[in-house]
Image (cartoon, grey):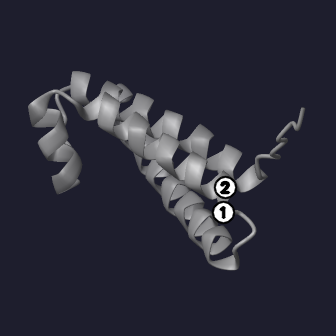
């Protein structure tokens, strides 16, 4: 039998971690009374499918990033997404700290 073995690149693992953090921080912000600024995700929040949609998008990036990692373009896109997600996580943390310290 042939076994397929795929190594998940560290950039994809980092994106998965940042995606989970983003989802968690977003849900905490919603429970605190804040809204969503992304218009697409705002629509999913109104429809009650935010967590599913956010998790699905994160999973899609993980899947495609792992499958197509050998392509330089995909590597660049995943690393750029990581920088964006890291910045967004920083904004979430700043907002959470501001909320806690009020």
Q: Quadrant of the N terminus?
A: top right
Q: Residue at x 25, y 33 (%)?
A: 50
Compared with 9, 76 (above or below) is: below
Q: Quadrant of the C terminus?
A: top left
Q: Which residue is mark 2?
A: 67
Is 98 in front, or is 75?
75
Callout 1: few (<14), some (14-19), or many (20+) C-alpha neighbours within 10 Å? few
Going by the image, does 40 lie left or right of 68? left
Question: Quadrant location of residue 98?
Answer: top left
Compared with 45, 40 (above or below) is: below
Which mark identifies residue 100?
A: none
Which mark identifies residue 68?
A: 1
Compared with 17, 73 (above or below) is: below
Residue 97 appears anywhere in the view? no
Residue 40 appears anywhere in the view? yes
Q: Residue 6 location in percent, x, y?
A: 80, 45
Callout 2: few (<14), some (14-19), or many (20+) C-alpha neighbours within 10 Å? some
Q: Residue at x 66, y 63 (%)?
A: 68
Question: Quadrant location of residue 46?
Answer: top left
Q: Are marks 1 and 2 in contact (CB under 8 Å)?
A: yes
The residue positioned farthest toward the front in the image shown: 1
Q: Residue at x 22, y 30 (%)?
A: 49
Going by the image, does 10 lie left or right of 30? right
Is 100 in front, or is 78?
78
Q: Residue 90 location in percent, x, y?
A: 50, 49
Compared with 86, 96 (above or below) is: above
The residue positioned farthest toward the top in the image shown: 31
Q: Distance from label 1 to label 2 (Cα)?
A: 4 Å
């Amino acid at each position: 039998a042939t076994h397929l073995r795929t190594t998940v690149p560290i950039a994809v693992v980092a994106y998965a971690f940042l995606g989970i953090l983003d989802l968690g921080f977003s849900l905490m912000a919603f429970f605190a009374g804040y809204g969503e600024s992304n218009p697409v995700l705002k629509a999913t929040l109104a429809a009650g499918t935010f967590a599913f949609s956010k998790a699905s998008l994160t999973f899609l990036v993980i899947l495609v990033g792992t499958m197509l990692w050998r392509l330089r373009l995909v590597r660049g896109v995943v690393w750029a997404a990581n920088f964006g997600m890291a910045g967004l996580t920083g904004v979430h943390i700043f907002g959470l700290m501001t909320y806690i310290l009020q």
